[in-house]
Amino acid sequence: MLDDLRRSNQELEQFAFVASHDLQEPLRKIASYTQLLQRRYADQLDEEAGEFMDYAVDGAKRMQHLIDDLLRYSRAGRVDMARQPVALDELLDQVLGDLSSKVAASGAEITITPQLPIVDADPTALAQVLRNLIDNALKFHGGQPPRITIRSRCTDTEAVLVVADAGIGIPPEQAEQVFGLFQRLHRDPQQPGTGLGLTICRRLVERGGGTIRIVPDIHHGTEVELTLPLTTEGSP
Protein backbone atom coordinates (compact mmCIF):
# COMPACT_ATOMS: atom_id res chain seq x y z
CA MET A 1 0.00 0.00 0.00
CA LEU A 2 2.73 2.45 0.97
CA ASP A 3 4.74 1.54 -2.13
CA ASP A 4 1.68 2.13 -4.33
CA LEU A 5 1.05 5.51 -2.68
CA ARG A 6 4.70 6.51 -3.07
CA ARG A 7 4.68 5.49 -6.73
CA SER A 8 1.44 7.38 -7.33
CA ASN A 9 2.87 10.53 -5.73
CA GLN A 10 5.99 10.26 -7.86
CA GLU A 11 3.88 9.90 -11.00
CA LEU A 12 1.80 12.93 -10.04
CA GLU A 13 4.95 14.99 -9.42
CA GLN A 14 6.36 13.88 -12.77
CA PHE A 15 3.10 14.82 -14.49
CA ALA A 16 3.07 18.26 -12.83
CA PHE A 17 6.66 18.87 -13.88
CA VAL A 18 6.20 17.78 -17.50
CA ALA A 19 2.83 19.48 -17.95
CA SER A 20 4.05 22.74 -16.44
CA HIS A 21 7.26 22.71 -18.47
CA ASP A 22 5.43 22.01 -21.74
CA LEU A 23 2.85 24.74 -21.09
CA GLN A 24 5.47 27.46 -20.80
CA GLU A 25 6.28 27.94 -24.50
CA PRO A 26 2.70 28.25 -25.86
CA LEU A 27 1.85 30.56 -22.97
CA ARG A 28 4.83 32.78 -23.77
CA LYS A 29 3.60 33.01 -27.37
CA ILE A 30 0.10 33.99 -26.26
CA ALA A 31 1.44 36.72 -23.96
CA SER A 32 4.03 38.09 -26.38
CA TYR A 33 1.73 38.23 -29.43
CA THR A 34 -1.10 39.78 -27.40
CA GLN A 35 1.28 42.48 -26.15
CA LEU A 36 2.50 42.99 -29.72
CA LEU A 37 -1.08 43.54 -30.88
CA GLN A 38 -1.56 46.03 -28.05
CA ARG A 39 1.46 48.08 -29.06
CA ARG A 40 0.97 47.94 -32.83
CA TYR A 41 -2.77 48.64 -32.95
CA ALA A 42 -3.29 50.69 -29.80
CA ASP A 43 -4.46 53.74 -31.76
CA GLN A 44 -7.01 51.63 -33.67
CA LEU A 45 -8.65 49.98 -30.64
CA ASP A 46 -11.57 51.53 -28.82
CA GLU A 47 -11.61 51.66 -25.02
CA GLU A 48 -13.50 48.38 -24.62
CA ALA A 49 -11.17 46.48 -26.97
CA GLY A 50 -8.18 47.88 -25.06
CA GLU A 51 -9.64 46.56 -21.82
CA PHE A 52 -10.13 43.12 -23.38
CA MET A 53 -6.48 43.05 -24.41
CA ASP A 54 -5.44 44.06 -20.89
CA TYR A 55 -7.48 41.17 -19.47
CA ALA A 56 -5.82 38.74 -21.89
CA VAL A 57 -2.30 39.89 -20.98
CA ASP A 58 -3.10 39.85 -17.26
CA GLY A 59 -4.54 36.33 -17.54
CA ALA A 60 -1.44 35.11 -19.36
CA LYS A 61 0.83 36.60 -16.69
CA ARG A 62 -1.18 35.00 -13.90
CA MET A 63 -1.00 31.65 -15.66
CA GLN A 64 2.76 32.06 -16.01
CA HIS A 65 3.07 32.64 -12.25
CA LEU A 66 0.97 29.54 -11.62
CA ILE A 67 3.11 27.41 -13.93
CA ASP A 68 6.30 28.72 -12.30
CA ASP A 69 4.96 27.80 -8.86
CA LEU A 70 3.86 24.36 -10.05
CA LEU A 71 7.39 23.74 -11.29
CA ARG A 72 8.80 24.92 -7.96
CA TYR A 73 6.39 22.64 -6.10
CA SER A 74 7.41 19.66 -8.26
CA ARG A 75 11.12 20.39 -7.83
CA ALA A 76 10.66 20.75 -4.07
CA GLY A 77 9.78 17.06 -3.97
CA ARG A 78 12.45 15.91 -6.43
CA VAL A 79 15.66 17.77 -5.71
CA ASP A 80 18.06 16.21 -3.21
CA MET A 81 18.65 18.22 -0.06
CA ALA A 82 22.25 19.33 0.51
CA ARG A 83 22.02 19.71 4.28
CA GLN A 84 24.88 21.49 6.04
CA PRO A 85 25.44 23.89 8.94
CA VAL A 86 23.60 27.15 8.16
CA ALA A 87 24.00 30.29 10.27
CA LEU A 88 20.53 31.83 10.35
CA ASP A 89 21.96 35.33 10.95
CA GLU A 90 23.89 35.17 7.68
CA LEU A 91 21.08 33.55 5.71
CA LEU A 92 18.60 36.21 6.82
CA ASP A 93 21.02 38.95 5.76
CA GLN A 94 21.07 37.37 2.31
CA VAL A 95 17.28 37.03 2.14
CA LEU A 96 16.67 40.61 3.28
CA GLY A 97 19.18 41.79 0.70
CA ASP A 98 17.13 40.03 -1.99
CA LEU A 99 13.99 41.74 -0.69
CA SER A 100 15.58 45.13 -0.02
CA SER A 101 13.59 47.04 -2.67
CA LYS A 102 10.27 45.67 -1.34
CA VAL A 103 11.27 46.42 2.24
CA ALA A 104 12.17 50.00 1.33
CA ALA A 105 9.03 50.55 -0.75
CA SER A 106 6.75 49.30 2.04
CA GLY A 107 8.47 51.24 4.83
CA ALA A 108 8.74 48.00 6.79
CA GLU A 109 10.24 47.79 10.26
CA ILE A 110 12.05 44.47 10.73
CA THR A 111 13.42 43.40 14.10
CA ILE A 112 15.66 40.35 14.38
CA THR A 113 16.72 38.79 17.67
CA PRO A 114 20.54 38.76 17.82
CA GLN A 115 22.61 35.56 17.66
CA LEU A 116 20.21 33.27 15.87
CA PRO A 117 21.27 29.60 16.01
CA ILE A 118 23.11 27.45 13.50
CA VAL A 119 20.83 24.81 11.98
CA ASP A 120 21.22 21.71 9.84
CA ALA A 121 19.50 22.64 6.55
CA ASP A 122 19.78 23.05 2.82
CA PRO A 123 20.65 26.77 2.53
CA THR A 124 18.93 27.26 -0.84
CA ALA A 125 15.71 25.61 0.30
CA LEU A 126 15.65 27.42 3.64
CA ALA A 127 16.34 30.76 1.95
CA GLN A 128 13.33 30.14 -0.31
CA VAL A 129 11.15 29.44 2.73
CA LEU A 130 12.27 32.55 4.61
CA ARG A 131 11.94 34.70 1.50
CA ASN A 132 8.36 33.55 1.03
CA LEU A 133 7.39 34.12 4.68
CA ILE A 134 8.89 37.63 4.79
CA ASP A 135 7.40 38.49 1.40
CA ASN A 136 3.95 37.46 2.69
CA ALA A 137 4.40 39.68 5.74
CA LEU A 138 5.35 42.59 3.48
CA LYS A 139 2.28 42.07 1.27
CA PHE A 140 -0.46 41.41 3.81
CA HIS A 141 0.25 44.23 6.24
CA GLY A 142 -3.11 46.01 6.27
CA GLY A 143 -3.25 49.78 6.44
CA GLN A 144 -0.03 50.36 8.38
CA PRO A 145 3.60 49.85 7.28
CA PRO A 146 4.67 46.24 7.92
CA ARG A 147 6.18 45.40 11.30
CA ILE A 148 8.01 42.07 11.26
CA THR A 149 9.79 40.33 14.13
CA ILE A 150 12.07 37.31 13.74
CA ARG A 151 13.07 35.50 16.91
CA SER A 152 14.23 32.07 18.00
CA ARG A 153 14.59 29.68 20.91
CA CYS A 154 16.32 26.32 21.15
CA THR A 155 15.80 22.91 22.67
CA ASP A 156 18.57 20.32 22.95
CA THR A 157 18.08 19.20 19.35
CA GLU A 158 15.97 21.82 17.57
CA ALA A 159 15.82 25.50 16.80
CA VAL A 160 12.39 27.11 16.85
CA LEU A 161 12.29 30.11 14.51
CA VAL A 162 9.29 32.45 14.56
CA VAL A 163 8.47 34.96 11.82
CA ALA A 164 5.78 37.27 13.22
CA ASP A 165 3.99 40.25 11.71
CA ALA A 166 1.31 42.74 12.72
CA GLY A 167 -0.67 42.41 9.48
CA ILE A 168 -4.18 41.26 8.62
CA GLY A 169 -3.72 37.81 10.16
CA ILE A 170 -5.08 34.33 9.51
CA PRO A 171 -8.22 33.05 11.31
CA PRO A 172 -7.36 30.08 13.59
CA GLU A 173 -9.78 27.79 11.76
CA GLN A 174 -7.83 28.38 8.53
CA ALA A 175 -4.34 28.00 10.01
CA GLU A 176 -3.92 24.53 8.50
CA GLN A 177 -5.91 25.18 5.33
CA VAL A 178 -3.44 27.79 4.06
CA PHE A 179 -0.82 25.06 3.58
CA GLY A 180 -3.03 23.22 1.09
CA LEU A 181 -2.62 23.33 -2.68
CA PHE A 182 -3.99 26.49 -4.33
CA GLN A 183 -5.37 27.81 -1.04
CA ARG A 184 -5.50 31.60 -1.15
CA LEU A 185 -6.94 33.13 1.99
CA HIS A 186 -6.89 36.69 0.61
CA ARG A 187 -8.15 37.00 -2.97
CA ASP A 188 -7.47 40.70 -3.44
CA PRO A 189 -6.59 41.14 -7.14
CA GLN A 190 -4.04 43.73 -6.07
CA GLN A 191 -2.15 40.99 -4.21
CA PRO A 192 -1.01 38.46 -6.82
CA GLY A 193 -0.45 34.89 -5.76
CA THR A 194 -1.16 31.32 -6.73
CA GLY A 195 -1.89 29.70 -3.37
CA LEU A 196 1.22 27.51 -3.62
CA GLY A 197 3.75 29.51 -1.61
CA LEU A 198 3.07 28.04 1.82
CA THR A 199 2.54 24.58 0.29
CA ILE A 200 6.06 24.74 -1.15
CA CYS A 201 7.39 26.03 2.19
CA ARG A 202 5.93 23.06 4.07
CA ARG A 203 7.29 20.56 1.56
CA LEU A 204 10.80 22.06 1.74
CA VAL A 205 10.82 22.32 5.55
CA GLU A 206 9.54 18.77 6.08
CA ARG A 207 12.00 17.32 3.58
CA GLY A 208 14.72 19.02 5.61
CA GLY A 209 13.59 17.29 8.80
CA GLY A 210 11.63 20.19 10.27
CA THR A 211 8.06 21.38 10.74
CA ILE A 212 6.12 24.56 9.95
CA ARG A 213 2.82 25.80 11.32
CA ILE A 214 0.74 28.90 11.92
CA VAL A 215 0.69 29.66 15.66
CA PRO A 216 -2.99 29.68 16.73
CA ASP A 217 -4.82 32.25 18.86
CA ILE A 218 -2.72 35.25 17.87
CA HIS A 219 -4.81 38.38 18.46
CA HIS A 220 -3.02 40.57 15.92
CA GLY A 221 -1.12 39.57 12.80
CA THR A 222 0.38 36.20 12.01
CA GLU A 223 3.11 34.07 13.57
CA VAL A 224 4.70 31.30 11.54
CA GLU A 225 6.76 28.83 13.58
CA LEU A 226 9.47 26.64 12.07
CA THR A 227 11.31 23.88 13.88
CA LEU A 228 14.70 23.09 12.36
CA PRO A 229 17.32 20.53 13.43
CA LEU A 230 20.32 22.04 15.18
CA THR A 231 23.79 21.15 14.00
CA THR A 232 26.36 19.55 16.28
CA GLU A 233 27.76 23.07 16.58
CA GLY A 234 24.68 23.92 18.64
CA SER A 235 23.49 27.48 19.13
CA PRO A 236 25.44 30.52 20.23
Image: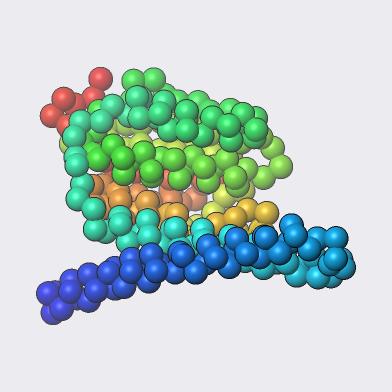
Q: How is the image coloured?
A: rainbow
Where residue 166 sits, quadrant-wise, is top right
Where residue 230 sits, quadrant-wise, is top left
Q: Is 41 on the left-hand or right-hand side of 139?
A: right
Against 212, residue 113 (above or below) is above
**Going 44% across and 58% down the picture, which residue do you hit?**
68
In x, y percent, where is residue 70?
A: 41, 62
**Going 16% across and 25% down the picture, which residue do you hit?**
233
116 and 100: which is toward the camera:
100
Q: In which quarter of the image is the N terminus?
A: bottom left
Q: Quadrant of the C terminus?
A: top left
145 and 20: which is toward the camera:
20
In x, y percent, where is residue 44?
A: 85, 66
**Going 49% across and 69% down the picture, which residue do you hit?**
26
Where residue 167 sits, quadrant-wise, is top right
In x, y percent, where is residue 106?
A: 64, 34
125 and 24: which is toward the camera:
24
Q: Is 40 on the left-hand or right-hand side of 44?
A: left
Q: Can residue 171 be seen in this view?
A: no
**Going 34% across and 20% down the picture, which residue do you hit?**
115
